Image (cartoon, rainbow, N blue to C red):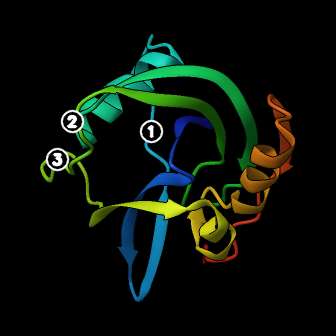
Amino acid sequence: MRCRPALVIIENNHLLVMKYQYGEQFIYNLPGGNPDPGELLSETIARECMEELGIDVEVGTMLLMGQVSGNEQRDAVLHILFEGEIISGIPELQVDETSAQEIVWMPIEEVNHITMYPNIGIELVDLLITQQKGKYVGAIQQPWFA
């Protein structure tokens, strides 16, 4: 199982997401990525945010984690989301480092109406309301996976 840490950055009731297109579908992803050997999860997030968005970030408390099952075509992934904030820079796609099409500041009330990877929109909105951090959500259903 792979591990993918990601950062939840909220400013003015908007969530920072990266927009990708797969076939005819748009998928929204939180900034983050796969750890390099020996790298701490917070270091992975900081590196990925600098490489892909050109920003320095502060990684805070773990918010939630859950698993997406694998199959013959892809590994299972443990997604670990952390709260965070931008400490310097303005998010701008670094086109040589990512296949994302654009950066979107998504209104929080729309998060559970978009297709996300991982598919945690409902859980994320619930977390923001209840402030119950550190939650394990178990299996994350990804209905758009073939």
Q: On the image, numbered disc 1 is attached to which residue?
A: 32
Classify residue 72 by image quadrant: bottom right
Quarter of the figure that contains the N terminus = top right
Give the mark nearer the N terminus: 1 vs 3. 1
Q: In the image, what residue occupies the spot 62% across and 71% down?
A: 110
Vertical order, 26 against 130 (above or below): below
* Circle on res. 54: 2
Q: In the image, what residue occupies the spot 79% across and 45% down?
A: 127
Q: Secondary structure at mark 2?
A: loop
Can you give x and y, in whole percent of width and height, for residue 138 in the image? 86, 46
Q: On the image, numbered disc 3 is attached to which residue?
A: 94
Can you give x and y, in whole percent of width and height, for residue 96 in the image? 12, 49
Of circles 2 and 1, which is in front?
2
Local crowd size for mark 1, using a 10 Å CA cut-off: few (<14), some (14–19), many (≥20): many
The span from disc 1 to disc 3 (Cα, nearest Å) is 14 Å
Q: Are marks 2 and 3 in contact (CB under 8 Å)?
A: yes
Can you give x and y, in whole percent of width and height, for residue 81 in the image? 63, 36
Local crowd size for mark 2, using a 10 Å CA cut-off: few (<14), some (14–19), many (≥20): some
Q: In this view, which residue lies farthest toward the left?
A: 96
The span from disc 2 to disc 1 (Cα, nearest Å) is 13 Å
Can you give x and y, in whole percent of width and height, for residue 103 in the image? 32, 58
User: In the picture provided, is 116 more to the left or to the right than 100?
Assistant: right
